Image (cartoon, coloured by chain):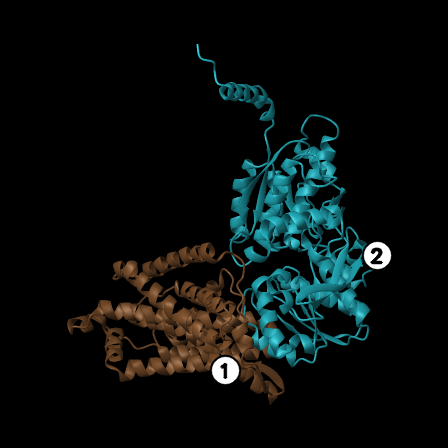
Chain colours: A brown, B cyan
């Protein structure tokens, strides 16, 4: 029983982290039809900015609890600066091009950002363990778990619910859904597509940075951390269906639980398990679990 | 007529002197050494950049003649050396292409941290007939599965690391009944685990393996793995994690009591000392892939590297720095042995002949090119335990093992040696 409990909890924690990464990726694809490889760089930037901001906060001797606010501030800062910078400075000139071309463009951005990060922060790892250890542990099934894991679950839940509410219960959200459903008709109805794109990309960038910022206290922030994340986030988004928020949530949960069970019962297959889930789902549903049905256009 | 000012006369004399001595001073072409190390990517911080720093420092101080004995002669036998530095990042296929481009530009190549890169480069070095010294990679397969004329390795293999930590463990905990592992799912992690498991089963027949966790390289997050280890009931946990993965494992495991509940072995943990310091819990068994860093014997060469490196880079040199300095000094020793007392610079074949079975001094102690028909180094091993004293991490209870106790005899493969009960 304890084993099942620990597998479920570890799976949910991992799923929460995956969801934070994949929500922004799937949102950007849904609205803009861009498979944004630079999402991994925004995650890495969030992590590095969090280390710098929260590190400076703690070095100044300010209350340790305030470092959580610094993590959030780092995510917002990265999202609000780099999101609009990339969208207005580069991507807006590329709309209308083939999706593969856009993947290559964002991949180029990803490579450039990797070097920019190295130039700014160097090659040594950055550590920010204080926020992880600060809330202490709790016991579950006789094993110690960090309370910080509950914070990650809470952030993912709040993010998911807030996004769902904003999309389905607000005017701006409905405008966004209209663009996802049909861009041309939306334009014809007077929706300012440029503004929708800008807002979507900034929001997606902030979500990526949020994932990075709140992951920073649990890992060593090193060059290349964005690579690992973007591969996993792609897998989750493909399982859930490109452009589907609920798909990203279910995909993250599925991958999280399968990985956690594999680590416990068949650790040699951990690397394979995530992609096995993806392969099985794609065999059964080639467009993912929750991909929207597209109307045939004549 | 006005007199020519004295300082103008001095300047003219100085220029005249330079013109006279210049051709003599610049007659000797520098020996060009290609240095290949990870300058970008996740392994740059813990290994690649410390190795590059050590290469630049060693080359500069050799040229100035300020390295202690027996390396006091300037450059290589009086000939200055010049480095051409290449990034190792990008994988074996890219490295083979980079190596082919590098070979015509240099006289000797020293490099390679990744075992995958070493396995790919060795046959190409042989094909291109270029003296190539592998300085860090650990896989024993290089000289166990093949024989090379142009390839040497001046650092010990990974087998030594894991046999030495197993010996250290059973000497201190003779009644150990079970162990578990967490190692990265690629050649290094798999080989390290296989060597440790093999050594433990030989040293303590009947010992039980509880679980072997194999997370993806650069996974960074080990929540589920730590839960499994905590619930495994294993007395000992072995890990060859390195870089960001190792740091993440310690940061995530320590607050959950992993290091209190289990005896943890970090077989390649030494580079993390500079990053994590006192965050590495007390009682952790630590290796440094040889007698390097804090395990280095107290010699003039070790003191030189530690002082000069720390003065320049404000951090102590780690094992990657030691191994790079050792490789350069090893080639220098072979070069000067080949040159002998003569004035002619030795050709490549003479350097190779001098290098085979050579014994030389490095900052980590005596290095013997004893395996792989005289192309593979062996060294004594050292293992210790962490202890935080006055807020600083220190290594206590250091044990040293002679090279022949932790490495197979020449011609015997590591896995066969482990299965044979570590017989000599």
Neighbours of disc 1 within 10 Å: few (<14), some (14-19), many (20+): some
In screen coordinates, is B374 left or right of A144? right
Give the labeled residue for mark 2: B424
Q: Chain of mark 2?
A: B
- Estimate the spatial distance between the alpha carbons at disc 2 and disc 1, rounded to whole Å: 54 Å
Quarter in which the N terminus of chain B is drawn: top left
Residue at image x 44%, y 55%? A115
Q: Nearer the viewer, mark 2 or mark 1?
A: 1
In screen coordinates, is B323 left or right of B206? left
- Front residue of B78 and B422: B78
Quarter in which the C terminus of chain B is drawn: bottom right
Residue A289 visible here: no
Disc on res. A150 = 1
Q: Give percent across and percent down for residue A213.
A: 45, 70
Q: Say whether mark 1 and mark 2 are on the same chain.
A: no
B150 shown above or below B44: above
In screen coordinates, is B283 left or right of B274? right
Q: Give percent across and percent down for residue B84.
A: 55, 41
Residue at image x 40%, y 82%? A158
SS for tag 2? loop
Q: Give percent across and percent down for residue B199.
A: 76, 65
Q: Quadrant of residue A173?
A: bottom left
In screen coordinates, is A268 left or right of B196? left
Residue B1 visible here: yes
Q: Give percent across and percent down for residue B65.
A: 67, 36
Neighbours of disc 2 within 10 Å: few (<14), some (14-19), many (20+): few
Disc on res. B380 = none
């Amino acid at each position: 029983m304890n084993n099942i409990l620990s597998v479920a909890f570890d799976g949910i924690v991992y799923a929460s982290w995956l969801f934070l990464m994949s929500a922004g990726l799937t949102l950007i694809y849904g609205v803009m039809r861009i498979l944004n490889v630079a999402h991994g760089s925004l995650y890495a930037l969030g992590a590095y900015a969090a280390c710098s901001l929260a590190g400076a906060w703690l070095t100044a001797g300010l209350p340790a609890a305030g470092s959580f606010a610094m993590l959030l501030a780092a995510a917002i800062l990265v999202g609000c600066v780099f999101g609009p910078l990339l969208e207005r400075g580069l991507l807006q000139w590329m709309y209308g091009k083939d999706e593969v071309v856009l993947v290559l463009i964002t991949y180029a951005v990803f490579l450039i950002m990797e070097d920019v990060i190295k130039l700014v922060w160097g090659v040594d790892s950055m550590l920010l363990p204080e926020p992880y250890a600060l809330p202490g542990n709790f016991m579950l099934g006789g094993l110690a778990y960090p309370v910080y894991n509950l914070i990650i679950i809470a952030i993912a839940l709040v993010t998911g619910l807030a996004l769902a509410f904003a999309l389905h219960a607000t005017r701006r959200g409905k405008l966004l859904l209209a663009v996802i459903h049909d861009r041309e008709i939306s334009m014809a109805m007077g929706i300012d597509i440029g503004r929708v794109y800008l807002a979507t990309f900034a929001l997606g960038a902030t979500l990526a940075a949020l994932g990075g910022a709140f992951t920073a206290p649990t890992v060593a922030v090193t060059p290349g951390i964005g690579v690992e994340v973007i591969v996993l986030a792609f897998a989750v988004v493909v399982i859930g269906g490109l452009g589907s928020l609920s798909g990203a949530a279910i995909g993250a949960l599925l991958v999280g639980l399968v990985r956690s069970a594999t680590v416990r019962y068949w650790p040699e297959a951990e690397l394979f398990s995530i992609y096995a889930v993806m392969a099985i789902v794609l065999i059964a549903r080639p467009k993912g679990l929750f991909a929207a049905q597209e109307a045939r256009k004549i | 007529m006005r007199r020519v000012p004295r300082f103008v006369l001095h300047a003219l004399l100085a220029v005249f002197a330079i013109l006279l001595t210049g051709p003599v001073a610049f007659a000797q072409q520098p020996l060009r050494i290609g240095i290949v190390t990870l300058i970008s990517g996740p392994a740059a911080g813990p290994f690649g950049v410390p190795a590059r720093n050590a290469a630049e420092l060693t080359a500069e101080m050799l040229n100035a003649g300020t390295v202690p004995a027996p390396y006091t002669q300037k450059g290589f036998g009086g000939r200055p050396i010049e480095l051409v530095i290449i990034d190792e990042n990008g994988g074996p296929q890219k490295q083979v292409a980079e190596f082919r481009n590098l070979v015509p530009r240099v006289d000797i190549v020293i490099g390679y941290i990744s075992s995958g890169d070493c396995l790919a480069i060795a046959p190409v070095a042989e094909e291109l007939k270029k003296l190539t010294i592998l300085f860090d990679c650990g896989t024993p397969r290089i000289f166990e599965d093949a024989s090379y004329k142009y390839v040497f390795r001046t650092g010990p293999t990974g087998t030594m690391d894991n046999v030495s930590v197993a010996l250290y463990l059973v000497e201190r905990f003779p009644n150990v009944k079970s162990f578990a592992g967490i190692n990265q799912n690629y050649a290094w992690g798999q080989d390290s685990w296989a060597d440790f498991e093999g050594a433990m089963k030989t040293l303590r027949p009947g010992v039980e393996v509880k679980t072997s966790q194999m997370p993806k390289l650069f996974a960074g997050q080990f929540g589920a793995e730590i839960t499994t280890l905590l619930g495994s009931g294993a007395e000992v946990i072995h890990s060859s994690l390195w870089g960001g993965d190792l740091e993440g494992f310690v940061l995530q495991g320590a607050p959950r009591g992993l290091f209190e509940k289990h005896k943890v072995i970090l077989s390649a943990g030494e580079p993390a000392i500079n990053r994590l310091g006192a965050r590495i819990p007390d009682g952790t068994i630590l290796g440094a892939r040889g007698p390097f860093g804090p395990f280095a014997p107290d010699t003039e060469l070790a003191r030189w590297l530690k002082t000069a490196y720390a003065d320049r880079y404000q951090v102590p040199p780690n094992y990657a720095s030691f191994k790079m300095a050792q490789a350069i000094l090893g080639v220098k020793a072979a070069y000067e042995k080949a040159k002998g007392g003569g004035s002619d610079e030795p050709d490549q074949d003479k350097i190779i002949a001098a290098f085979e079975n050579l014994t030389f001094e490095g900052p980590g102690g005596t290095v013997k090119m004893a395996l792989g028909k005289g192309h593979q180094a062996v060294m004594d091993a050292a293992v210790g335990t962490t202890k935080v004293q006055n807020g600083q991490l220190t290594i206590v209870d250091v044990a040293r093992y002679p090279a022949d106790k932790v490495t197979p005899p020449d011609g015997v493969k590591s896995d066969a040696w482990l299965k044979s009960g570590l017989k000599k």
